[in-house]
């Protein structure tokens, strides 16, 4: 779990201080004031506990007590980031959540290198199947993704996109309902530079 | 006030078993929206007291308490239910964050979610009228003074700018009627 967390922190570190070498002090400082990292850290703990409780199959007092002990911290992180990540969501190491929060996240799987912006909703509680997000996906602010869909590796969702259908790798989607804006687009710059104007960057790159 | 609150509680208690008093703390803990609705109904009750003879004697000492609770709900949960809204019993508020309900009328048994905005930004303008059993998806915005029919379904992220008849499914931004005679009872 520690190495997973190190990868999560490294991607947030690169986004916050591009080109600066990550030391243990700078990592700790990042962890202290990045709401997105708290959210992910708390999710990793809650996810581990959820898997243990599901594996035991029946209520176990020890796990229940641990869950009750974690609940106040989880609540504090949830309300400070105004976010909620489903306990059963599988998030690979090296994912970055926006520090601005308002993220309601319930993807079935999320690949490494994916960056989630603020005010994003993924998955709907009433659906039987929830989205599967590939690797190196960039999801901009105010996006909504729901349904039994899969998002290909390296896809880009520009801010304000509402996506309900599966998309292939490396496409750029925009609008509500979502339409393909570009194909075969490399979103590495978007994922590394949080200050970038996404739409302008996509239009100028091709 | 209490029959309204019990309808709100029954809305989050989605089980065949009847609601017991012992369930109330856990329901409140889990549903930030329910806490917000309780504070909203308390504020509306205080507002009604002021129109009654000697009602100010009841309302005045409780007013500061309501203000503190209202500020807590707004800043901590990001759920703003303004007193100018008229919310019928049995509203369901999913998740938290970015929910703004301003001047508008909401029918019974509706459901809203995170990042939903209802009512005009201008405090003097009239707001939308939303029917009964309307399901409003996350990130939907209804700012104009439109009428939404009973049993309508507003898809996630829609911006509704026109009147919607009963039992319609609205998708897209600006919202278009994608299907008529749509039944939302399965997920309401």
Image (cartoon, coloured by chain):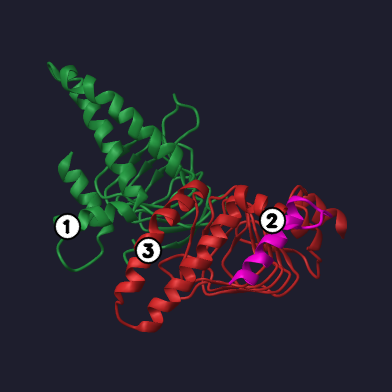
Name the quadrant containing residue B154.
Answer: bottom left
Which residue ends up furthest to the left in the rendered image? Answer: B53
Measured Cα–Cα span from mark 3 to mark 1: 40 Å
Q: Position of residue B157 (x, y in %)?
A: 53, 53
Q: Position of residue A172 (x, y in %)?
A: 73, 64
Mark 1: secondary structure: helix
- Give the magenta-colored segment's residue range: A1-24
Mark 2: secondary structure: helix
Q: Which of pointers 1 and 2 indicates the residue nearer the eye?
A: 2
Q: Position of residue B41 (x, y in %)?
A: 26, 37
In the rendered image, the vertical position of residue A180 relative to residue B58, given as above or below: below
Q: What residue is rendered at 67% in x and 71% in y?
A: A112
Left or right for B172, reference B129: right
Chain painted green:
B
In the rendered image, the vertical position of residue A12 relative to residue B39, given as above or below: below
Asked whether the residues under the numbered discs 1 and 2 touch, taking CB atoms below 8 Å apart as contact, a structural biologist would say no
Chain A, which colour? red
Q: What residue is rendered at 20% in x and 58% in y?
A: B23
Q: Which mark is residue B22?
A: 1
Measured Cα–Cα span from mark 2 to mark 3: 55 Å
Left or right for A70, reference A58: right
Q: Which mark is residue B181?
A: 3
Camera-side residue of A146 and A115: A115
Q: Which residue is mark 2?
A: A27
- Residue A173 in sight in this render: no
Q: What residue is rendered at 33% in x and 73% in y?
A: A62
Left or right for B95, reference A5: left
Q: Position of residue A188 (x, y in %)?
A: 80, 63
| Neighbour tally class for label 2: few under 14, some 14-19, many 20 plus, Cα within 10 Å | some
Chain that bears disc 1: B
Q: Which of pointers 2 and 3 indicates the residue nearer the eye?
A: 2
């Amino acid at each position: 779990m520690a190495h997973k967390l190190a990868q999560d922190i490294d991607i947030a570190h690169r986004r916050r201080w591009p080109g600066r070498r990550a030391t243990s002090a700078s990592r700790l400082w990042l962890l202290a004031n990045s709401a997105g990292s708290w959210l992910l850290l708390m999710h990793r703990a809650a996810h581990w506990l959820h898997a243990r409780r599901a594996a035991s199959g029946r209520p176990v007092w020890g796990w229940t007590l641990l869950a009750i002990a974690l609940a106040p911290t989880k609540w504090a992180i949830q309300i400070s980031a105004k976010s909620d990540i489903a306990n059963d969501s599988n998030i690979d190491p090296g994912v970055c959540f926006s520090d601005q929060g308002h993220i309601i996240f319930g993807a079935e799987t999320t690949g490494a290198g994916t960056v989630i912006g603020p005010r994003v909703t993924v998955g709907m509680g009433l659906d039987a199947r929830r989205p599967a997000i590939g690797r190196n996906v960039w999801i901009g602010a105010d996006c909504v993704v729901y349904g039994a869909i899969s998002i290909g590796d390296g896809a880009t969702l520009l801010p304000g996109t509402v996506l309900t259908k599966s998309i292939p790798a490396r496409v750029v989607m925009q609008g509500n309902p979502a339409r393909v804006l570009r194909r075969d687009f490399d979103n590495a710059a978007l994922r590394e530079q949080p200050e970038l104007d996404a739409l302008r960057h996509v239009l100028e790159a091709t | 006030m209490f029959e309204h609150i019990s309808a709100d509680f029954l809305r989050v208690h989605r089980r065949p078993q009847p609601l017991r008093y012992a369930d109330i703390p856990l329901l409140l803990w889990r549903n930030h929206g329910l806490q917000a609705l309780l504070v909203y109904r308390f504020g509306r009750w205080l507002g009604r007291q002021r129109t009654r003879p000697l009602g100010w004697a009841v309302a005045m000492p409780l007013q500061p308490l309501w203000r503190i609770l209202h500020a807590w709900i707004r800043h901590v949960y990001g759920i703003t239910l303004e007193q100018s809204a008229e919310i019928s019993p049995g509203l369901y508020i999913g998740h938290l964050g970015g929910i703004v309900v301003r001047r508008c009328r909401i029918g019974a048994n509706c459901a809203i979610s995170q990042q939903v905005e209802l009512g005009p930004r201008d405090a003097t303008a009239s707001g939308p009228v939303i029917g009964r059993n309307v399901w409003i998806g996350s990130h939907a915005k209804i700012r104009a003074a439109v009428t939404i029919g009973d049993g309508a379904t507003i898809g996630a992220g829609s911006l509704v700018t026109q009147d919607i008849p009963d039992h319609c499914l609205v998708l897209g931004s600006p919202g278009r009627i994608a299907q008529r005679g749509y039944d939302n009872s399965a997920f309401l």
